[in-house]
Image (cartoon, rainbow, N blue to C red):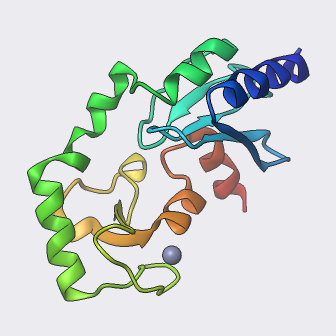
Amino acid sequence: MSQSLIKKVRKLSEAVGLDLVLINEQSGHYQLKGGPMLVNWYPFSANRTAYVKSTKKGVKQATPEQVVKMAFSAPEVQAEKVTRNSGKAKRAKARLLKKCPFCHWCNCPLTAETATLEHIIPLKRGGLDHHNNMTLACEKCNHGRGHDMPELNKEADHA
Ligand SMILES: [Zn+2]
């Protein structure tokens, strides 16, 4: 069932120039890259959920068509993290860049283009959406932490 879903998503994504990448074989975490939105997809989970990066809620039992479509349009749940793109978030990012233009986790140098604003203590774990709890991370580390992805979080808790 899941394998045929994956095949279908791969086919659909190739047709529109997206890349379906297996991120974590154990958790069955796939990413759909190359579109305006990065989609995290868990075709082997019970809910077969797809998430647009930076959103907590996903589309359950997502069909291949939905998964591919999500890479091009943010679902309504995106509103939950609207602060990320707000003027407040932009100012926070600029301020942090000025203070220390390095990734909080791997120390690589950052620019306005490569820096992503990130919560030191994820909101999911009770961290505040406040500048005291914000830092900069490179795209790679931001992905790696995966705190916006509940199904990855479970793994992290057991690690
Ligand atoms: Zn980093």
Q: Which image quadrant for residue 77?
A: top left
Left or right, 42 with respect to 85, comes to right
Query: Can you see residue 92?
Result: yes
Could you tell me how many numbered marks the image carries? 0
Residue 100 sits above or below residue 78 on the image = below
Q: Which image quadrant for residue 134?
A: bottom left
Quadrant in which the N terminus is drawn:
top right
Residue 57 placement (x, y as % from top left): 46, 28
Quadrant in which the C terminus is drawn:
bottom right
Query: Can you see residue 61?
Result: no
Which residue is rendered at x = 88% and y = 17% of the image?
A: 4
Residue 27 sits above or below residue 80 on the image = below
Residue 13 sits above or below residue 106 on the image = above
Left or right, 47 with respect to 10, comes to left
- Between 119 and 4, the residue placed more toward the observer is 4
Residue 134 sits above or below residue 31 on the image = below
Residue 154 placement (x, y as % from top left): 65, 46
- Between 156 and 84, the residue placed more toward the observer is 84
Residue 65 placement (x, y as % from top left): 63, 13
Residue 150 placement (x, y as % from top left): 56, 40
